[in-house]
Amino acid sequence: MKKKSLILIFIIIIFLSSCSNSSAKYTQKYEDQFFAMGTVITQQLYYDDSQKVFEEVKKRFKDIENSMTINTPGSLVDNLNSKSGSGSFVKLNKDIIYVLSKAKNFASLSKGSFDVSVGPLVKAWGVFTDNPRIPNKNEIDKLKSLVDYNDIKLNEKSLSASLKRKNQIVDLGGIAKGYAGDEAIKIFKKHGITSAFVNLGGNVVTLGGKPDGSPWKVGIQNPRGPDGEYIAIVKVSGKTVVTSGDYERFFEKDGVRYHHIIDPTTGYPSKSGLISTTIVTSLSIDADALSTSTFVLGLEKGMALVKKMKDTEAIFITEDKKIYTTTGLKDKITITDDNNEYEYIK
Ligand code: ADP
Ligand code: MG
């Protein structure tokens, strides 16, 4: 056969297969909800074989959770922590090595404001347990000295890592959900899906826009309002929107709020003046690390870091109820603060 006719047949096959795809695969919206990584996860797909894809994502998320959790003895990250200070490298897996290398990168970019070796402090405060407490100053100072991302040594070839000093603890709570979000998108793409939306307890990841081509609308939680009350809507296509806030997990004692994001330099819940930070970018792992980083860094240093990053936008809310955004977001954000509780600084 001549080269020209071969090419023509090839084009016809591609055309026919794309026709059958668009008519059979993208007719209606399918939704699935499950619990993993300590939160409710919702997936939305426009794809007729969605059940199979939902199950694949669910399995992937459970695998990520099982290897990265520090609440189950014997998980890979727990193995790493329990061998801290022994000098031996602990065999991990590709996922964890990638997440740890990203974590170290963001630790260095944020000058240690984001540091996954913050585990001893997170554990001492017990914000996630039924018995949260305020550790005394002595204890905090001792535990604070254990926090140093430079002590996480990686061997990417053998997929292993070690923690230099005894009692050091890696806690991937500030980055793992971001990674899982990116993995969901990978699975969708593998199936040829072009339109999807996943919400991992406030971490949103999207693939493409809605099937009609319009962008997804992502609500930004009012940090001082009831759950589900939004103060802004952001329009995105193929981007992730990740928020860190002091309202997500906290306890109160004598009128003081103690939340779950720890400032490694003080050892106390971060008091940077920010109560919510949202990052909009391409990779959800980056957004997750950056939302936690900027929350600790505060308005000025946080904005400076965001501006240094490529293709990255942010929404910061301060405790005196002002909303700041990067310039790239101005035409994508709608403030829906009906009570005029917040002031939008343009
Ligand atoms: P959420 O998990 O509520 O969405 P974040 O992504 O901001 O919120 O992560 C907060 C979690 O990250 C904490 O629960 C803790 O496990 C961990 N963490 C707390 N402080 C830090 C920090 N300074 N750097 C890195 N991880 C942190
Ligand atoms: Mg985070």
Image (cartoon, rainbow, N blue to C red):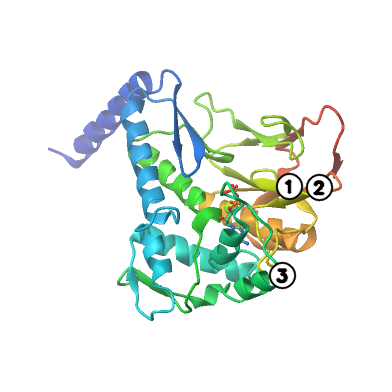
**Residue type, label 3:** Lys
Locate residue 150 relative to residue 111 in the image: left or right. left
**Is the Cβ of the residue at disc 2 closer than 8 Å to that at disc 1?**
yes
- Look at 37% across and 44% down and name the residue there: 62
- Mark toward the start of the polypeptide (2 vs 3): 3
Residue 207 in sight in this render: no
Q: Residue at x 56, y 60 (%)?
A: 123
Residue at image point 28% right, 33% down: 11
- What amino acid type is highlighted by mark number 2? Gly
> What's the residue at 40%, 44% (across, down)?
61
* Helix, strand or loop for disc 2: loop
Label 2 – label 3 distance at C-alpha = 19 Å
Residue 64 in percent (x, y) is at 39, 50
Whole-percent x and y of residue 235?
65, 35
The residue at label 2 has a CB less than 8 Å from ligand 1: no
Q: Position of residue 268 (x, y in %)?
A: 70, 62
Residue 255 - label? 2
Residue beneath label 1, please? 252
| Dot 1: element | strand
